[in-house]
Image (cartoon, grey):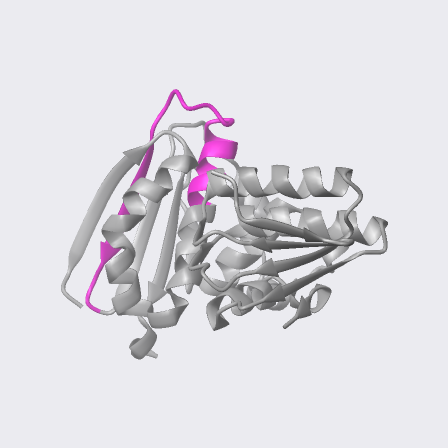
Amino acid sequence: MKNQVKRHNSTVQLKIPKEVTVQASTDLREQFLDCIADGYADFRLDFTNTTFLDSAGLGVIVTLKKRTNDANGTVSIEGASDSIQELFQLTRLKPSFQWR
Amino acid sequence: MTKTSFVRYINNPKEIKNIRKDYYPYLVEGFGSDQLLVEASISEAVVNAWRHGHEESDDRSIRVEVNFLHSRMVVRITDQGEGFDWQKYQCHNDMRHWFPCMEELEEPGRGIILLLRVMDSLRYNKKGNECLLMKKYQNQG
């Protein structure tokens, strides 16, 4: 199942699914790589509805971050719950992203 | 917390989404908003068993045992692999406070740091094919 993606100018807005399971992580990775291949470098990830994310999901987001770094792009995260933010904090990923 | 146990067998980490429905309410009861971190840790241990124990094959099953005791949760993840020499990887408790920078942080390293940070205890059996996770409930200090 594909996630909701909106593309504006150079920015991609993507709604992260409720549960980022192993399968959902694979789908997300494909979507990110498709967008990067199309030349997009700035991403806004909406975590408003997300209640489950593990290190496989984090891995996909780190991959996105590394790819956008190569293109001088940015990754911002909005709507993340305290738990999601703590997951990023515990794995020391939080400072690498812009938080809204 | 009422004592409850679940034992489930899965062949691929994708099946976690089918069994997590069973233990999710107990995670919320025991850990409140921290349930996400605990679930992510259980998921990590299952992925490790599949990846390293079964070399990403779906031919063998992974046993997932989740026990909700009065004051703590105990999880055992058992694979049918040959095990690994975990004693080589033993680290001091201060590993919990050690963080590499993102550029060094590939997925396996991130997973083990998550387990060490979230769980009160992380142990392996002697063979190295069974992982035991323990964590006290939120109100147990």
Judge from the rendering whether residue B51 lies leftward or rightward of residue A6; answer left or right: left
Q: At which x and y percent is residue B135?
A: 36, 64
Judge from the rendering whether residue B103 lies leftward or rightward of residue A30; answer left or right: right
Question: Residue at 28% across / 34% down in the picture?
Answer: B9
Judge from the rendering whether residue B16 lies leftward or rightward of residue A57; answer left or right: left
Membership of B46 in magenta stretch? yes
Q: At which x and y percent is residue B43?
A: 43, 47
Q: Tell me if residue B91 can be seen.
A: yes
Q: Against B63, is A46 above or below?
A: below
Q: Against A100, is B10 above or below?
A: above
Question: Residue at 15% across / 60% down in the picture?
Answer: B3
Q: Nearer the viewer, residue B21 or B135?
A: B21
Q: Tell me if residue B109 can be seen.
A: no
Q: At which x and y percent is residue A95?
A: 70, 69
Q: Against B129, is B81 above or below?
A: above
Question: Residue at 78% across / 53% down in the picture?
Answer: A10
Extreme-front residue of the structure: A8
Membership of B19 in magenta stretch? no
Question: Residue at 37% across / 50% down in the picture?
Answer: B132
Q: Nearer the viewer, residue B110 or A22?
A: A22
**Highlighted range, magenta:** B45-70
Extreme-left residue of the structure: B2
Judge from the rendering whether residue A77 lies leftward or rightward of residue B103; answer left or right: left
Image quadrant where one finds the C terminus of chain A? bottom right
Q: Nearer the viewer, residue B25 or A98?
A: A98
Q: Against A46, is B8 above or below?
A: above
